[in-house]
Amino acid sequence: MKTEVLTPLAESIQKISALLLAGEVVALPTETVYGLAADAFSEKAVGKIFLAKERPTFDPLIVHISDKYLHAPEGIMHSLIKAGILGDEALAPAALKVLEKLMRKYWPGPLTFVLPRGSKIPDLVTAAHSTVGLRCPAHSLFQQVLSTVPFPLAAPSANRFGRISPTQASDVMAELGGRIPAILDGGACGVGLESTIVKLELHPLSLTLLRPGKINAAELESESGLEVKQSPGLMEQNQNALAPGMLDEHYAPKKQLFLMNQPFTLVPLSMLASVIPEVLWKRTGLLSMKELEPDFPQEKFGEVHVLSASNDTREMAQKLYRALRSLDARPELQAIIADV
């Protein structure tokens, strides 16, 4: 199969729409990472996502909705239930109030809610759970595509399962070229990390953080007035995960990755040498979150990436996957070492 990379023109949106209406999968940009999208109401179309990604069916997908639901006169939740996307179990008055508030605050944006699923969402999307992950993406191209089709889009990251998520169209081509018909090139993703995922708990009313992201637990607690519990942790293979990103193989580079528990600016070189012998540093990629000290021996490493010279966490997030992918692609490197 030939994979076509489309520029963001009106005719490209039409071509993407036609492919989706025909039950195909396409790669689309979001503000977080590129997504591999298909008709969320069609089990056959969604099945093509799993085939292209080599993704296990026990790992659920996130459903992406049009921002038209944010302007529905009956309210966001009622309109999603009416559309068959959500079930009415989330309609308890207290739950409804909290959800509407959070959705109006953070949507469109990088926040996914795990809520009771509606009748039109097939088992394959949810890994047979009674809940579905739902978000409204902020990327204008994704929203333009959604405005041309009569269904929401299931869209996990557009990479093969367990690989580093793509933040630009060339990453998608490297991962899925020849497997999908089209990629819509929207440039580099603005956020660069997957969305925060929270699950609504009804008894008692609370939120559980299933996957961290740009929007943190403290912010959600402050906005919702609810307790935000931490997730149960990574799942083992063959367990049906509650949400994407909960399996221990997610987002991993192919090369061996060593994580230091403090910044490189505070790590003695002797400690680095105890993790990776100095004789192997030239075959090691170094990934630093912030600017290194002037006397740090960068020249001794095979490749060095500094995510933010100004210690900007947003810049770090945007560049993280791109840097990991660059290091992972260098054949002469054997390992990657990163700080926090």
Image (spheres, grey):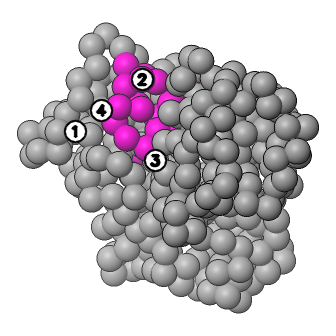
Kindly check if marks 1 and 3 are in contact, taking CB atoms under 8 A apart as contact: no
Using the numbered discs, state the Cα–Cα distance from disc 4 to disc 3 in whole angstroms. Answer: 13 Å
Q: Earlier in the sequence, mark 1 or mark 4?
A: 1
Q: Position of residue 306 (x, y in %)?
A: 55, 52
Viewer-nearest residue: 72 or 188: 188
The three-letter amino acid code for the residue at tag 2 is Ala
The answer to whether residue 133 is magenta is: no
Secondary structure found at label 4: strand
Report whether 256 appears left or right of 47.
Answer: right
Q: Earlier in the sequence, mark 1 or mark 3?
A: 1
Query: Image quarter for residue 22?
Result: top left
Task: Say which residue appears at 57% left-offset and 35% top-offset.
Answer: 303
The N terminus, quarter of image: top left
Residue corresponding to mark 3:
33
Residue corresponding to mark 1:
17
Foreground label between 2 and 4: 2
Using the numbered discs, state the Cα–Cα distance from disc 2 to disc 4 in whole angstroms. Answer: 11 Å
Q: Is residue 327 shown to the viewer in this render?
A: yes
The three-letter amino acid code for the residue at tag 4 is Ile
Foreground label between 3 and 2: 2
Using the numbered discs, state the Cα–Cα distance from disc 1 to disc 3 in whole angstroms. Answer: 20 Å
The answer to whether residue 162 is magenta is: yes
Q: Is residue 117 shown to the viewer in this render?
A: no
Task: Say which residue appears at 52% left-offset and 61% top-offset.
Answer: 308
